Image (tube, grey):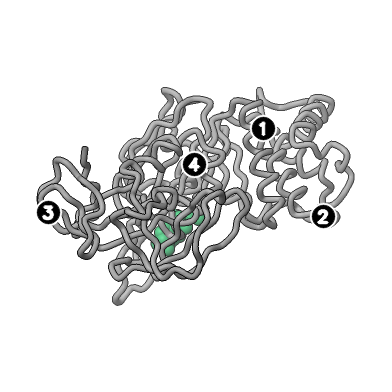
C-alpha cells in the first residue's frame, strides 16, 4: 500500500497563553512512501517525527494537508478504520493479560464483516507470534519477558490484524545495545517477509541507515533530504544532514575558496573547480583523509586509537569547528606517535563545501 503525504502540516497552539508561540511541529511535508518499502523518519528530538507518524495513524489530525493510502483519502478516517499497526517505544502491553491474550486483543473488537471465529483468531495470533518468534511464550505475562521479547509481542499485536501500514515510533529505544541490533534485524526481516509498507521513526542515524529503503531527514518540522541511505551519506544537501549522518561524525572546518582552491587556514588543501571565491564551511568524512607525507593538509597529532582493521587518528587544527578531528586510516599504515604533525591529502568525493551563511551545499567539479 502506497502512502502519500500531501502538504502535511501540524501546528500546536501555544501551551503558555501569555507569551508562548504556537509550535509548527510539521511544516508542509510532501512525500510518497512507495508500496512495500521501509521508510526511516530520522531527525533530532522534537523535529516532528512522532507528530508525522501520529498523523499517518489518525491519532492526530493535520492542521493542513492530506493523507492517502493508495488512492483512498484517509485524512478524515479514524485510526481504527485506517488499517494500521502501531508500535511504540514503551511496548504498551496489557500487564494482566498473557502474551496470547495481548495478541488476540485487536481481533476481538472486530465488527461486522471483519468479525472472526475463535479458531480464526487463534490461527492468526499463532501466525503473528511465529513471525516474531515468540510462539513458545504465549502463556506468559509481559512481566515474565525480557524487553526484547515484550517488543516482539507488541509487534505481533500490531501485525495480527494484517495492517495496510505498519508504524513504529522509536521501537528499539528501550532495549540494550545488543538486543537493539538483533531486534532491528528482526524488524527488517519481518517487514520484508510481509511486504507491509512501514514507517520507522528514530533519532539514531545508524539505526535508520541500516534498515531503511529510504530515509527522510527532518529538522524543526521541515524535511531536509529524502533518499537512499547511501546516497544521503554520499551526497548531503546541507550542513545539517552532513553532520547528522555518519559515525564517527564528519569533521567540520572554517574555510575559504579563492581562485578555485579550497583554503583551510593558510593551507590550500584541494582544487575546487567551478566555485567562486567565498567563505565556506568544509565538511570532511573521517574516511576522506589519506596519509601523505607531502600532503597539503597538516594537522596537530594528538592520539591514535586502535580499532582492529582500522585506526582512528585524533588530531586538531586551528580552523576546526569541532574540538578534535577524527580520521579513519587502514591499520597497515604505521603512524609515528612521537611526531607533532600529521599530513594528509584529501579524497575529493569525501569533502563537502557549504555556504558559510546558508549552510547549503556548494558543488565543485
Ligand atoms: P519528535 O518525535 O521528532 O521528537 P514530536 O513530533 O514529538 O518530535 O514534536 C515536534 C514538536 O511539536 C516539538 O516541539 C514538541 O514539543 C511539539 N509537540 C508535540 N506534541 C505536542 C502537543 N500535543 N502539544 C503541543 N506541542 C506539541
Ligand atoms: Mg518522538
Quadrant of the frame with the C terminus: top left
Residue at the outermost bottom position: 18
The secondary element bearing badge 2 is classed as loop
Label 1 Cα crowd, 10 Å radius (few <14 / some 14-19 / many 20+):
some
> What residue is drawn where x is 61% and y is 31%?
163
Query: Marks 3 and 2: which is nearer the front?
Result: 3
Q: Quadrant of residue 90?
A: bottom right
Which one is in front, 230 or 41? 230
Q: Which residue is mark 2?
A: 96
Label 4 Cα crowd, 10 Å radius (few <14 / some 14-19 / many 20+):
many
| Up-down relation of residue 50 to residue 31 (above or below) | below
In the image: residue 195, left or right of residue 75:
right
- Chain-order first, disc 1 or disc 2: 2
Label 4, label 3: how far apart the Cα atoms are:
39 Å
- Chain-order first, disc 4 or disc 1: 4
Label 3, label 1: how far apart the Cα atoms are:
53 Å
Query: Marks 4 and 2: which is nearer the front?
Result: 4
Label 3–label 1 contact, CB within 8 A: no
Q: Which residue is mark 3?
A: 258
Which one is in front, 282 or 208? 282
In the image: residue 105, left or right of residue 165:
right
In the image, residue 97 lies at what x, y percent? 82, 50
In the image, residue 119 lies at what x, y percent? 84, 25
In the image, residue 319 lies at what x, y percent? 28, 67
> What residue is drawn where x is 64% and y is 43%?
184
- Chain-order first, disc 3 or disc 1: 1
- Chain-order first, disc 4 or disc 2: 4
Residue 190 - label:
1
Q: Which residue is mark 4?
A: 40
Amino acid at each position: 500500500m502506497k502512502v502519500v503525504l500531501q502538504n502535511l502540516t501540524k501546528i500546536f497552539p501555544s501551551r503558555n497563553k501569555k507569551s508562548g508561540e504556537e509550535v509548527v511541529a510539521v511544516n508542509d511535508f510532501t512525500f510518497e512512501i512507495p508500496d512495500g518499502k521501509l521508510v526511516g523518519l530520522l531527525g533530532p528530538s522534537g523535529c516532528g517525527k512522532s507528530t508525522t507518524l501520529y498523523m499517518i495513524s489518525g491519532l492526530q489530525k493535520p492542521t493542513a494537508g492530506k493523507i492517502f493510502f493508495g488512492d483512498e483519502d484517509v485524512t478524515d478516517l479514524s485510526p481504527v478504520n485506517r488499517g494500521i499497526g502501531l508500535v511504540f517505544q514503551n511496548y504498551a502491553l496489557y500487564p494482566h493479560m498473557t502474551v496470547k491474550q495481548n495478541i488476540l486483543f485487536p481481533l476481538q473488537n472486530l465488527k461486522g464483516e471483519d468479525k472472526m471465529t475463535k479458531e480464526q483468531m487463534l490461527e492468526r495470533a499463532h501466525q503473528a507470534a511465529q513471525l516474531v518468534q515468540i510462539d513458545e511464550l504465549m502463556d506468559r505475562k509481559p512481566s515474565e519477558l525480557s524487553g526484547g521479547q515484550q517488543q516482539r509481542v507488541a509487534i505481533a499485536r500490531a501485525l495480527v490484524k494484517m495492517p495496510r501500514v505498519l508504524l513504529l515510533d522509536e521501537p528499539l529505544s528501550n532495549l540494550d545495545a545488543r538486543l537493539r541490533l538483533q531486534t532491528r534485524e528482526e524488524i527488517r526481516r519481518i517487514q520484508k517477509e510481509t511486504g507491509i509498507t512501514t514507517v520507522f521513526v528514530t533519532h539514531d542515524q545508524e539505526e535508520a541507515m541500516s534498515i531503511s529503503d529510504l530515509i527522510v531527514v527532518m529538522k524543526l518540522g521541515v524535511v531536509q533530504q529524502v533518499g537512499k541511505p547511501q546516497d544521503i551519506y554520499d551526497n548531503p544537501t546541507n550542513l545539517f544532514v552532513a553532520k547528522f549522518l555518519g559515525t564517527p561524525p564528519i569533521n567540520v572546518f572554517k574555510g575559504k575558496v579563492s581562485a578555485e582552491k579550497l583554503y583551510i587556514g593558510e593551507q590550500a588543501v584541494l582544487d575546487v573547480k567551478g566555485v567562486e571565491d567565498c567563505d565556506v564551511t568544509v565538511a570532511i568524512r573521517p574516511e576522506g583523509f589519506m596519509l601523505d607525507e607531502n600532503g597539503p593538509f597538516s594537522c596537530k597529532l594528538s592520539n591514535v586509537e586502535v580499532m582492529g582493521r582500522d585506526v582512528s587518528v585524533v588530531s586538531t587544527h586551528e580552523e576546526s569547528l569541532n574540538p578534535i578531528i577524527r580520521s579513519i586510516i587502514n591499520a597497515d599504515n604505521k603512524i609515528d606517535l612521537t611526531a607533532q604533525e600529521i599530513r594528509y591529502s584529501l579524497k575529493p568525493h569525501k569533502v563537502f563545501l557549504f555556504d558559510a551563511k546558508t549552510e547549503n551545499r556548494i558543488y565543485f567539479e
